[in-house]
């Protein structure tokens, strides 16, 4: 499908949906280039972070944030299966079936005046064409600036004027019990706002991403909400909606959002360098049973990796890195990942009855390999 035809198709879909909604409401009452820029985002004034909603409930917060949230439509060519599932089809001169077009939808958040958007990597992964539709109904093409599969984030760029970038919340203002709104495009019905609270912070070990530090919320999040905004009672961005826990496929009150601090770090690295670089030691770590005390056990060390070069051995128990205590394998991986590749850090560890301090040069984390 040609780009012009694809964009026209998206506009027709949006227009048809709008006509259908008007009918229901008013008539049928009974019925990867490398960027060399610096992205500038809008930041919330900390004093207003937990301001109570006004007399109109969350109306003001929703109106402030909704223009910043877009619908994301993708088109990709999916290979068809061979006739009858028989690989011998080719041996008899059978032509390779033409790929079929497949569309999917999600959400995104405008984060700067010059057209940068945040969304989930899984929303745009493998897409041949991407279109975004603003709350006004206007549609435009978007390109991928960069992706980070390990946090499931992606940065898009659109060429458009008069954008309404969202305000970033003060990270220190986010806490359990805060009222939040989830804004996105669930099931493709159009922009939708749901309300709930922050149920927990710092959720990890969920098996969703490599690096996890999720905000948990009971605001309804459904398929199509991925990449949309989780905002506080003032309309400031606190997270990017990413996943749900559900046995039915729909919202059951357990949704997860990537916190704004992590999203901003990924955004700035991708915009300035085109990729996300993380530190790496080349070790396999294991949590210790309580009776062995504090620290993280090293189960194995990669041959030729940074840890081996620095003197780390299997069986060592890491106590701290760069002066920061290591309490479990997640904190070890997070601390190392946040260290700039090429820098040298002190690793304090226990080896048998001795405590050692090693100077180790951190390497660059290899890219994630997809199965």
Image (cartoon, rainbow, N blue to C red):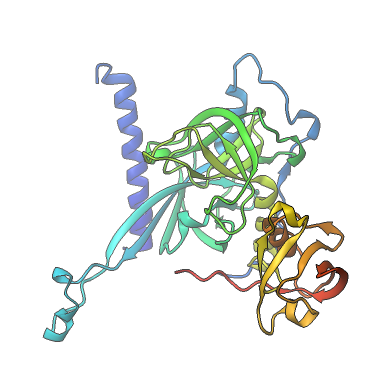
Q: In front here: 316 or 363?
A: 316
For this view, does 214 lie left or right of residue 76? right
For this view, does 28 lie left or right of residue 263? left
Q: In front here: 298 or 194?
A: 298
Which residue lies at the image location 11% right of the left edge and 84% below the top edge?
92
Q: Quadrant of residue 36?
A: bottom right
Q: In front here: 109 or 298?
A: 298
Q: Quadrant of residue 314?
A: bottom right
Which residue lies at the image location 49% right of the left edge and 42% below the top edge?
134
Which residue lies at the image location 58% right of the left edge and 43% below the top edge?
257
Q: Quadrant of residue 19?
A: top left
Residue 204 to residue 304: above or below: above
Residue 84 to residue 250: above or below: below
| Percent position of residue 308, x then y | 74, 80
Q: Extreme left residue here?
A: 92
Image quarter hosting the N terminus: bottom left
Image quarter hosting the C terminus: bottom left
Residue 350 to residue 178: above or below: below
Count every numbered label the image shows and give the total.
0
| Percent position of residue 32, x then y | 55, 69
Q: In front here: 176 or 147?
A: 176
| Percent position of residue 158, x then y | 54, 55
For this view, does 332 lie left or right of residue 346? left
């Amino acid at each position: 499908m040609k780009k012009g035809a694809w964009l026209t198709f998206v506009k027709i879909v949006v227009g048809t949906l709008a006509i259908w909604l008007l009918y229901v409401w008013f008539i049928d009452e009974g019925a990867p280039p490398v960027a060399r820029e610096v992205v500038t985002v809008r930041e919330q004034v900390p004093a207003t972070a937990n301001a109570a909603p006004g007399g109109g409930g969350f109306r003001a917060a929703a109106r402030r944030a909704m223009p910043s949230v877009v619908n994301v439509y993708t088109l990709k060519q999916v290979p068809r299966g061979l006739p009858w599932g028989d690989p011998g089809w080719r041996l008899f001169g059978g032509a390779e079936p033409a790929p079929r077009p497949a569309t999917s939808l999600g959400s995104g958040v405008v984060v700067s005046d010059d057209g940068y958007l945040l969304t989930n990597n899984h929303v745009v992964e493998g897409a041949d064409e991407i279109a975004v539709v603003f709350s006004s109904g206007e549609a435009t093409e978007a390109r991928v600036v960069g992706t980070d599969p390990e946090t499931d984030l992606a940065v898009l760029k659109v060429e458009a004027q008069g954008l309404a970038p969202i305000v970033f919340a003060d990270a220190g203002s986010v806490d359990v019990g805060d009222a939040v709104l989830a804004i996105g495009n669930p099931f493709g019905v159009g922009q939708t706002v749901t309300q709930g609270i922050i149920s927990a912070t710092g959720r990890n070990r969920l098996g969703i991403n490599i690096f996890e530090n999720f905000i948990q919320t009971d605001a309804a999040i459904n398929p199509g909400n991925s990449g949309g905004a989780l905002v506080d009672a003032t309309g400031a961005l606190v997270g990017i909606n990413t996943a749900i826990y559900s046995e039915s496929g729909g919202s059951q009150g357990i949704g997860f959002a990537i916190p704004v601090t992590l999203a901003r770090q990924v955004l700035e690295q991708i915009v300035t360098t085109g990729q996300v670089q993380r530190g790496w030691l080349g070790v396999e770590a294991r949590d210790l049973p309580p009776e062995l005390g504090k620290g993280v056990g090293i189960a194995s060390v990669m041959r030729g990796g940074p840890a081996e070069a620095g003197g780390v051995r299997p069986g060592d128990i890491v106590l701290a890195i760069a002066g920061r205590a290591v309490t479990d394998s997640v904190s070890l991986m997070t601390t190392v990942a946040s260290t700039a590749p090429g820098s040298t850090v002190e690793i304090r560890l226990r080896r048998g009855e001795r405590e050692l301090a090693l100077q180790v040069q951190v390497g660059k984390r290899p890219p994630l390999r997809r199965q």
